Image (cartoon, rainbow, N blue to C red):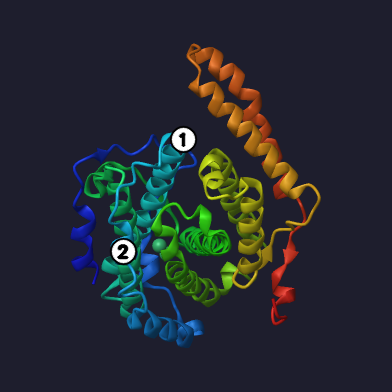
Amino acid sequence: MVSSVSPSIKTPNPGIKHPSQETVLTPRFYTTDFETAANLDLSAQESELQAMLAEMRADYNRHHFVRDEEFEQSWEHIEGGARKAFIEYLERSCISEFSGFLLFKELSRKIKAKNPLLAEIFQLMARDEARHAGFLNKAMGDFKLSLDLGEITKTRTYTFFPLEWVLYTVYLSEKIGYWRYIIIYRHLEKHPEHQFYPIFRKFESWCQDENRHGDIFKALIRSQPKLWNNWKSRLWSRFFLLSVFATHTLTVHERANFYHSLGLKATEFDQQVVRKTNETAGRAFPIMLNTEHPQFFHRLQKCSDYNLQISEIERSSQPKLIKFVRKLPLLIGIVWNLLLLYFIKPIDAEALRGTVR
Ligand SMILES: [Fe+2]
Ligand SMILES: [Fe+2]
């Protein structure tokens, strides 16, 4: 139950961390049109959603998020850059899990009367996200820091997204989350010498939660033909795929130190996650991006390079105006490359539907 889980994630440890400054790349908090959600006609995917509800009720990960004895030790040996990068990773992940919790909880509450099936599904997804956020916050506690999630709930700005955008973006963030967790897990299975903290051992079952959430959103998207059977839906899908991939690429390269400490190369990890998520998205979206186009990763990489140069300028002590003048061409470069990426001809996923991928 959501209500029984939420208090545990409100309890901050003694060292309360102020959330890092919000940028375009930080995970956002969303609100949406609850009336439209309550009135969704789910009949086209009713049996899929019933099956997903049964899986969610089964709660396979009920006993998974337990801090076993492996966590009971000092983590002072993780120092310097690696420590900072890991804390930032935990914080970003915690905020993003918590943002899912708040949105799902609110959706569940607001649609309960009109749409009990979907309300229960959202309530159970909120249960999972609360566990994930709580577990990450306790991991931050091992580094003597903790996020005051109650305070963040009140002070963060909420971005309004129409329900259709929520369905596209949450679907993608669940599936990209799945791939991020499982790729790290599988890598560490092969290279246990890089497993510097026990949370990574938890990722295998953890990512199955995200996979299930993604499947629920897939059923929701497929239940609304206007989200995949017309030109508008193809343009929106392209837009959201590209924005999620660009955000991922930029963030991974900003956090290259963290991936390095796991023995992963940021560029390889990034490309693997983008390719896999794109392939998966073809099961729900009308199109996939052409990641094999020779310019695709090349242009994403350019955006990331410009973004790193912008961060470098921001860290300098120059006057604001000088910083702005130096940043402007880089910002234009990012927008220009994203635009060119947007116009790379996508792959028609509807035409491929039914083939095994
Ligand atoms: Fe999650
Ligand atoms: Fe999730």
Q: Residue at x 59, y 23 (%)?
A: 327
In the displayed structure image, the side of residue 354 where residue 316 appears, left or right: left
Badge 2 crowding class, 10 Å Cα cut-off, few under 14, some 14 to 19, many 20 or more, is many
Q: Residue 242 vs residue 65: left or right? A: right
Which one is nearer the viewer's eye here, 298 or 182? Answer: 182
Rendered residue at 62%/73% (across/down):
283
Helix or strand or loop: what does disc 1 sit on? helix
| Residue 104 numbered mark, or none | none
Residue found 73% across the figure and 56% down from its top:
291
Dot 1 alpha-carbon crowd within 10 angstroms: few under 14, some 14 to 19, many 20 or more = few
Query: Where is residue 201 drawn, in percent x and y?
Result: 43, 63
State the mark number for residue 131: 2
Is residue 129 positioned above or below 301 on the image?
A: below
- Look at the image and tell me whether residue 59 can be seen: yes
Q: Pick whichever of labels 1 and 2 is earlier in the sequence.
A: 1
Q: Residue furthest right?
A: 294
Q: In the image, 28: left or right of 286?
A: left
Please, what secondary structure does the residue beneath circle 2 have? helix
Q: Amino acid at mark 2?
A: Arg
Q: Is residue 90 above or below residue 309?
A: below
Residue at the image position 62 percent from the left and 53 percent from the top: 269
- Classify the position of ligand 1 by quadrant: top left, top right, bottom left or bottom right: bottom left
Coordinates of residue 169 in the picture (x, y in percent): 51, 58
- The residue where tag 1 is placed is 81
Residue 29 placement, left or right of 291: left
Q: Amino acid at mark 1?
A: Gly
Q: Quadrant of the C terminus?
A: bottom right
User: Exactly how many numbered labels are in the figure?
Assistant: 2
Residue 152 screen position, x and y as percent: 27, 45
Return the x and y of residue 302 as percentages of the image width and height: 70, 37
- Specify the quadrant of the image occupied by residue 68: bottom left
